[in-house]
Amino acid sequence: MGHVSPDRTLVHLTTEPPSVDAALASVADPAAGGTCVFVGTVRDHSGAGAPVTDLTYEAWNELAAQRLDEIAQQITQRWQVRRVCLLHATGTLAIGQISVVVAVSAPHRAEAFEACRFGIEELKHDVPIWKKETLDSGEADWVMGA
């Protein structure tokens, strides 16, 4: 499988909504024939269908950064990719704001799609980032691994 040096990966927790443009710029590579980007946004309802006003993300920063880096390295070892970017916001975000961006460039589209899907699924499953949904009723619920 492919190997990407550390300067070909970008993982970052940010207190601002992640930038799709920054993610795309970080995975740009002249040897890439395809780039796949997943953008996660704050939706206006909970998993149970209740109206949501905002989300607050909290992370165990050191472990989250380490785990993001591990996922990026797994991607580079499993697929022949050129560059990988994993970005996630912390703090309170409004409806419609971007919470997470995963971008992968590869010589061919199949690898880019597969690696990007793996990246977001692993991030949601295994990175210590929690979200609190604030409902329009005023209640707030912590949601794990959603």
Image: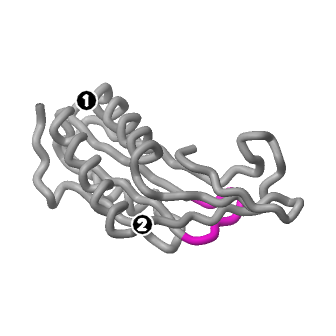
Residue 90, placed above or below residue 42: below
Residue at point 36%, 54% (across, down): 86
Counting residues from the start of the chain, the first of labels 1 and 2 encountered is 2
Element class at badge 1: loop
Quarter where residue 138 is shown: bottom right
* Farthest residue, direction right: 137
Residue 128, placed above or below residue 81: below
The magenta stretch spans residue 95: yes
Residue range (magenta): 91-98
Location of residue 77 in the rendering, given as x and y in whole percent from the top left corner: 15, 38
Location of residue 87 in the rendering, given as x and y in whole percent from the top left corner: 41, 59
Location of residue 134 in the rendering, given as x and y in whole percent from the top left corner: 75, 62
Q: In the displayed structure, does residue 60 sit left or right of residue 39? A: left
Q: Are marks 1 and 2 in contact (CB under 8 Å)?
A: no
Give the amino acid type for the residue marked by disc 1 in the picture: His
Element class at badge 2: loop
